Amino acid sequence: SQTIHQWPATLVQPVGSPLSLECTVEGTSNPNLYWYRQAAGRGLQLLFYSVGIGQISSEVPQNLSASRPQDRQFILSSKKLLLSDSGFYLCAWCLGGTSYEQYFGPGTRLTVT
Amino acid sequence: RKEVEQDPGPFNVPEGATVAFNCTYSNSASQSFFWYRQDCRKEPKLLMSVYSSGNEDGRFTAQLNRASQYISLLIRDSKLSDSATYLCVVISYNQGGKLIFGQGTELSVKP
């Protein structure tokens, strides 16, 4: 069966510091991968998605970037965090093709101070 | 107008009650629909896919009305463990298969 991991689970970072969040998927090949952010009391906002290694689509222009160095690894980065980057960051995968159900990792709760 | 709209609630119901959530979507080209459940400070989890003919999974029934562009979720015999936020999700193939999430409806089941 497939599993999705994210780390770290929680993170407190000062404004202006860099960020690297990692997501890995096991048990499947060539999944579609997604990064979402959920601000406190708000809905999920799609940040990036990837349909293959090195292929990244950005949904929202901001100071974040994503990379997919390996088939089942998805990384979210920032060079300088802003206070507004605080939130719950969720990675998700789906099989793609005609299968659209997405499955989420446990998330990283980021607080920028 | 938001692409997917839900009543945010909260819905406060006693154990054993039947509760229904509605969700409306604005894009008539929407093709696939889901309900997710999100517990406090946890990730969303897929609850049900919603099929054109409606579908049932135990105490949960999902229905789709394409003409009126709304989706519903019915929960019968509510349990304390049903307390969560329920997210309505819509996919429009003409938007590259992106999932569009509603803001969620909060349910609180009381003893």
Image: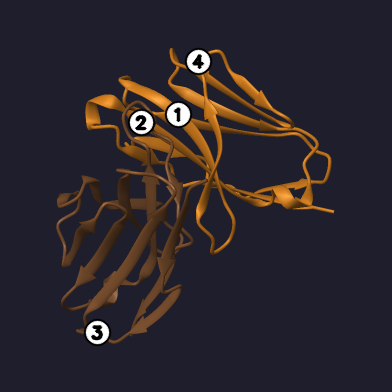
Letter of the chain in orange:
B
Q: Position of residue B9 (x, y in %)?
A: 58, 47
Q: Nearer the viewer, residue B50 or A113?
A: B50
Q: Secondary structure at mark 1?
A: strand
In this image, A41 relative to A111: left or right? right
- Identity, as a three-letter code, of the amino acid under mark 3: Val
Q: Between marks 1 and 4, how big is the CA–CA gap?
A: 9 Å
Residue placed under numbered mark 3 in the picture: A15
Vertical placement of residue B53 versus B90, above or below: above
Q: Chain of mark 3?
A: A
Mark 4 or mark 2: which comes first in sequence?
A: 4
Dot 3: within a 10 Å radius of its alpha carbon, few (fewer than 14), some, or many (20 or more) residues? some
Q: Between marks 4 and 2, how big is the CA–CA gap?
A: 14 Å
Q: Chain of mark 2?
A: B
In this image, A96 relative to A79: left or right? right
Mark 1 or mark 4: which comes first in sequence?
A: 1
Query: Is any part of residue B2 visible from this angle?
Result: no
* Marks 4 & 2 on one chain: yes
Residue placed under numbered mark 1 in the picture: B33
Q: Residue at x 78, y 46 (%)?
A: B79
Q: Position of residue B34 (x, y in %)?
A: 49, 33
Letter of the chain in brown:
A
The image quarter containing residue A11 is bottom left
Residue placed under numbered mark 4 in the picture: B52
User: CB atoms at circles 2 and 1 under 8 Å apart?
Assistant: yes
Q: Residue at x 21, y 80 (%)?
A: A18
The dot on residue B91 is 2
Q: Between marks 2 and 3, how big is the CA–CA gap?
A: 35 Å
Query: Is any part of residue B11 visible from this angle?
Result: yes
Q: Secondary structure at mark 3?
A: loop
Dot 1: within a 10 Å radius of its alpha carbon, few (fewer than 14), some, or many (20 or more) residues? many
